Amino acid sequence: MTRIHMAGAGGLLLDAADGAFNDMIQRRIWATSRELNAREDVVQTLPGVNNLLVMFDAAETDHAAMENLLRDVWTQASADEIPTREIVVPVVYGGTFGEDLALVARFANLTEEETIEAHMAGRYSVAAIGAMAGFVYLTGLDPRLAIPRRDSPRLRVEEGAVVIGGGHAGVMPCTSPSGWHILGRTDLCLFDAFRPEPGLLRLGDTVRFVRAS
Amino acid sequence: MIEILTGSSLNTIQDFGRPHAMAMGVAQGGAMDRLALGYGNLLLDNPLDAAGIEIVFFPFRVRFHAGMSFAVTGADCPVTLDDLQLPRDWAITARPGQTLIIRAPRQGARAYLTVRGGLDVPTVLGARSTDLKGGFGGFEGRALQKGDRLACMTATSIRLPAAGYGLSRACPLPPADGTQVRVLPAAEHEIFTPESLKTFQTAAWTLTPSANRMGYRLEGQETLALTRKLSLFSHGILPGTVQVPPAGQPIVQMMDANTCGGYPKIATVIEPDLRLLSQTTVGAPVHFREITREEAVQAVRQNATDLRNLTAGVSKLRAQLVF
């Protein structure tokens, strides 16, 4: 059941979540996002996980008309088939770089080695980009590793930390507070504002984690 | 060229931010009080969104190494150019070698220093704003430090009266006894208990010392609770979003907020009132008042009209200046 909520005078949040994460819904979110972004009266869209935030100029654009437009575009959207690339992320697991590995292993009732294997076995997909510049929400995490986020976030998690939280996987693109659990570390640069394409990963990309050699 | 004489981890170069980079996860950023930055630029006949310095750490001192026109706007601070005291929201021309001191505000929290032409720092991802979290934009991606020398964009000089000029009451500030902000209900509004929805609007929320450009954490006697446990997927959030984490105390997302989050949202502060919140001092009470979508749109339109009138007012005043 899709709901559309107000997000201030110049924002609408379409929430299409229906229980567990749904890949088909996500592809329709991307298609809706792409179509709306091409319009002059839309300032920006932000695809989330099975949801979409749409921003517009409330002084110029009628709120109700924008809501109708969003509903129409969403209803007619078909699942986006966007070209996918495979990005391989080399990880140093455990030790000082992965301080939560033991905790996650206990939660999953696995050994640390089995936990690493389970993390590496996943074929992840970039569902959404956000929170921090270049942070990606990866779907496809082994359900056994779906440990809830920490009750209180760490004030400082280092750039490159390979993390899991709330059923998603991710990599820290910069040093920042975070409530996700740290399994390891990568040297890949996920975001550089001065690169022609600042973000390393695009929506729909496939991500694989391997042990760094 | 201006030279920064006071270092801090909080004073940054800001313009109107990066709304079009949010899909990359980059914070919208930009001046917390856009009206104050914009008004300084108006007085200097700059583009409204030219880059200036957002000052929250006082006293703030700069030296002018060349003659140039500048403005100090926003919070009501004691401001001196060498020995000359300047009125609030004022533009004037400095001579080479003069020192400007902006002291702690009597009212408000953020002052803006703008210069004729705007500050000349590189445009990164569409703006000159400093993104402290990302470490880019502004001056070397960081807060201004003692000894930093900032260049101004090339612009023809403007002629100002020797004593300077300004409009009275251009940038209203929140009264000391409390900031009223208007809000619209947000996505999880209906899932909060009726008592919480009432408390949200009737309580005097206190701004806590952790308030920064990312978020304004508030504290109240009572906490806000949901009628049932929620587990939300991460979703886009805008500045002004009032999140309620499990502890039940609201956090208003500000200009450098994360672009996505997962906490329940009770309301959104309407854009014209976000600047008032940004000028609220730590420890001061904040009151939320829910309005309808129609009233919010009206307020946004009124805000745009006010800015047009202000622009016209400054332009008329400039034409009448007597030298």
Image (cartoon, coloured by chain):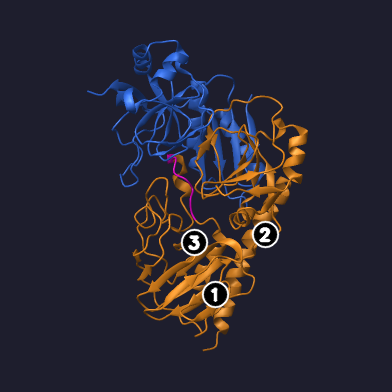
Q: Amino acid at mark 3?
A: Ile
Helix, strand or loop at mark 2: helix
User: Viewer-proximal residue, A22 or B149?
Assistant: B149
Would you name the residue on which mark 3 appears?
B55
Q: Main secondary structure of the magenta part?
A: loop
Specify whether residue A141 is in view.
no
Residue A67 location in percent, x, y?
63, 39
| Nearer to us: label 1 or label 2 | 1
Instruction: Name the kind of residue labelled 2 in the image.
Output: Gln
Give the CA separation, mark 1 to mark 2: 24 Å
- Relative placement, left or right, of B297 versus B210 is right
Colour assigned to chain A in the rendering is blue
Q: Amino acid at mark 1?
A: Trp
Tell me how many marks there are.
3
**Which of the two marks, 2 or 3, is nearer to us in this view?**
3
Quadrant of the snapshot with the N terminus of chain B? bottom left
Q: Disc 3, disc 1: CB below 8 Å?
A: no
N-terminal of the two: label 2 or label 3?
3
Q: Give the image location of residue A198, x and y in percent.
A: 34, 42
Up the image or down, B213 lies above or below B303; here it is above
The orange-coloured chain is labelled: B
Residue drawn at point x = 60 percent, y = 48 percent = B208
Q: Provide the residue span drawn in magenta.
A: B24-30
Residue annotated with mark 2: B302
Are the residues under badges 1 and 2 in a single subunit? yes
Instruction: State the residue position of label 1.
Output: B90
